[in-house]
Amino acid sequence: MLSARAQVMERSKNRGTGAGGRSSTMDRRRVTRAFKMRGLSIQSPALDAMMNVLQRDPSEEILHAVLDEIKERNMSSPDPSLVVTKQLLSNVVADMSRDGGDVTDEALQLLNAFDTPRLRFDTMRRQFNLLSKDMEPKGRSLHGEAIHKVDMFQQRYALIQQRILRQDLFRPKLATADGRHADGQTNVTHAITPVESMLGRSGVKFLLGMIVQVEEGRYYLEDHTAQVPMDLSHASVLTDGFITENCIVLVEGEMVDGVLQVHRMGNPIIESRLDAMDNIGLLNSDIFGSMSSLSELEKLREQEFQHGPDGMFVILSDVHLDRPVVMEKLERLFEGFQDMSPLPIFVFMGNFTSKPLSAARDGTKSVIAYYEELANLICKFPTIANEGRFVFVPGPNDPGLGNVLPRPPIPNYFTGALRSKLKHAIFASNPCRIRFFTKELVFCRQDIIGKLRQECLTPSFAEETAGGTGHSNNDRLVQHTVKTILDQSHLCPVSLTSSPIYWQYDHALRLYPLPDAVIMGDRTEQYYQNYAECDAINPGPFSSDFNFVVYRPVAEVERDVQTRSDVEFSQIS
């Protein structure tokens, strides 16, 4: 038995163009009377359109479903109208005719790294600006100047500094004469001391700065005022997470003979997405630039409540197309999802070959053949090929402009077969962002755990993560990694030597405000953690154990309650 909404969908897809059809004059009077009983007046063109919907089966259920929808829209509209126009009726029927797949497609939007707006903090005016590529004074280039490298690090520092200064621990409080404030608690706060103020002064101070290597093997703490050499030999780390070069850290220490002796240090205090969006004025904004008004954003939230649970991402990493066994497993994967409605969104992350592209001509031909073979495999499943959404994110060894982040999409030269045979294939940058209704998802393919372990400056952490075995050690590694990335608000908080970055596109790797999810394709085992209301997920290498992740960004929804996601680890046996 079809619901009224489903019947409207079926009939609206098959209705004719005539206004009269088999409906009698009595039918038109009955419909007009039904509108009047709801306090509505229907115009003649709108009545003709309504009769088209009812032409095949003049069902009272369908008529009242349309009337209920119109009344609901009037109640929620700031400017309700009692006159039903043809346009209003068409919009209502169109919305009722859409199924979950249609809405999911409209709710999906990809933002490549090179098109991502830049969130800039003006330290003089103490305000934020969201700058698109067109708003930059001189545009953006892959070949930046020295000033752009300076600005990159200044903005990383400024975004974390303003976040820290809003924390209660570092925010001055109004106190009474006896040192207590209104709620009766002791007024205990700490002041962040600029680095330049430490020179020539004694006593233990709190500082916020970036760890930089000015000389070989010698590290300095640097902020916007100065830099000072630091001694980490007796430092204790108070928080989970790796401490590496170019990390921004909170430090407690004192100057001894011109060197900052670090007693304790840790990663910056995290700030949730909602708090950050509210504090910087982006709570009702859309960084993707697709929502022209607040009402459209509210409509998207309503659609998320109704259709969000229908959406699902199937995420694979390290899909080595040059291995026959991988192609066999992919075929079984598509067999399992071909009958789903709506279809999931397939996200394939590199590397797409087990070895880097050879400079020889045969190497290029081979890679083109691998992508063509994948296209032919998907075409065995016509529904997936015609209706499925595919996102391809390049890995470190895939064809492109070297191993510098962000990486552009895989060149068209290699992916022509996929582009021509799949109707909805999207080739994204690495990293990239996807908006799913109101959720922001960040996808990045890099071996970040290995880089963080290699660059760790605190021996105790290196020994801890290297000494353990099995799942317990892997869990600790994941915990440290996730906390480092999210606390630092950056996908790659390591030295530029370890992971080069295009200076003018560093903002594409920043995670402030926090997204709703970070999907980090790494060569380690699968993992999932939720930290500060952000999902951190690694699907694991598909080429090793044929693991993948099924992710629902909106698994459960309740009115006036934050939506909940769902992560399912899967494997093809």
Image: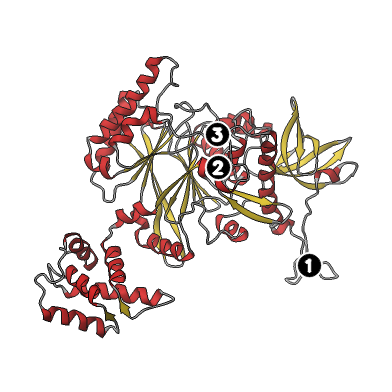
Say which label, 1 or 3, has the lower sequence index: 1
What numbered label is drawn on residue 493? none
Cα distance between the residues tagged 1 and 3: 45 Å
23 to the left or right of 521:
left
| On screen, residue 382 above or below 6 | above
Q: Tell me the residue at 34%/31% (across/down).
A: 416
Q: Judge by depth and name the residue closer to the eye, 420 or 302.
A: 420
| On screen, residue 238 above or below 17 | above
Q: Quadrant of the N terminus?
A: bottom left
Residue named by callout 2: 508
What numbered label is drawn on residue 405? 3
Cα distance between the residues tagged 2 and 3: 9 Å
Residue named by callout 1: 174
- Asked which secondary structure carries label 1, the reply is loop
- Asked which secondary structure carries label 2, the reply is helix
Quadrant of the image occupied by residue 392: top left
Three-letter amino acid code at the position of disc 3: Leu
